[in-house]
Image (spheres, rainbow, N blue to C red):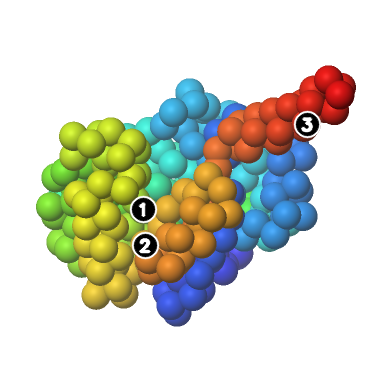
Amino acid sequence: MRENAVKKRLAAGGKAFGSMVFEFFTPGMPRILKNAGAEFALYCMEHTGTGFETLKPQFALCRALGVIPLVRVPATEYDLIARALDCGALGIMVPLVDSAEQAQFIVSCTRYPPAGRRGAAFGFAHDDYEGGDVVEKIRMIHDRTLVIAMIETRKGLDNVEAIAAVAGVDVLWLGHFDLTNFLGIPAQFQHPLYRDALERIVGAAERNGKAAAYMAADEALGREYLDHGFRMIATGTDQGMLQNAIQHNIAAWKTSASR
């Protein structure tokens, strides 16, 4: 069975870089990400309306390329978390995590009994349709499954230390826009409340042997958050990057044409 190189690197104190995918679920997307140097593809279901029928082929295409497929499910629900993993994702991100109890439930949905409550089905996409010893498969699945808790509410920030301490949570992901909204400072990313939140999230992650993560819209933001101690960075949004590139070129052409 496949390993999760991203989880292993983060657990060892390293860094991982990839891309979030919101809009472009074409067959070529995993290859494009691979060629660009992405180590993981993080597919978003929360804000896109995307379903598992669309994502399952993406997970399979990632498998062939060595890109680690991850998915942001839209809510803390067993059927969403377990189904994402059964479809072939090697990790899940859950939004709006407010408490250690919620984080414990999330982890339980990714583990088989007695460690959790995930229903058993083997010889499917998640184990590459292969046979083999079930006990060993369960061990490997538990070892490789990456669990990302999004810290993006005031409650989540207040409880970030307890969330980080939950066994099985691997990453604390800063939901930067939502966090500013919940703090009453929408999109004010230089506000002292927000800057303090960054330090609290990174500190909680470091004290508990977890990684802090962030989606950066550009190179400068990625560098800034790496300097803050974030160890998992994704580019995004895919539609935003495409739009910016097109806008840049067309604006340059219009300037040249007006001379």
Q: Nearer the viewer, mark 3 or mark 1?
A: 3
Q: Which residue is mark 3?
A: 252
Question: Pointer 1: what residue?
Answer: 173
- Whichever of labels 2 and 3 marks the residue nearer the N terminus, that label is 2
Kind of residue at badge 2: Ala
**Quadrant where the N terminus is found in the figure:** bottom right
Label 2: how many Cα within 10 Å (few below 14, some 14–19, many 20+): many
- Compared to residue 190, the image places residue 139 above or below, namely below
- The three-letter amino acid code for the residue at tag 3 is Ala
Measured along the vertical axis of the image, is residue 164 above or below residue 246? below
Q: Is tag 3's residue or tag 1's residue first in the polypeptide sequence? A: 1
* Residue for point 86% across, 24% down: 259
- Give the image location of residue 144, x and y in percent: 48, 65
Q: Please give left or right for residue 240 compared with residue 149 in the image.
A: right
Spatial distance from mark 2 to mark 1, Cα to Cα?
6 Å
In the image, residue 240 lies at what x, y percent?
A: 59, 33
Inspect this view and state whether residue 113 appears: no
Specify the label residue 57 is tagged with.
none
- Do the CB atoms of the residues marked 2 and 1 lie less than 8 Å apart? yes
Q: Which residue is mark 2?
A: 212
Asked whether, in this view, residue 1 is left or right of residue 65, the answer is: left
Q: Earlier in the sequence, mark 2 or mark 1?
A: 1
Q: CA distance from mark 3 to mark 1?
A: 36 Å
Circle 1 SS class: strand
- Residue 58 in view: yes
Label 3 secondary element: helix
Callout 1 amino acid: Trp
Q: Residue at x 17, y 63 (%)?
A: 161
The residue furthest bottom is 12
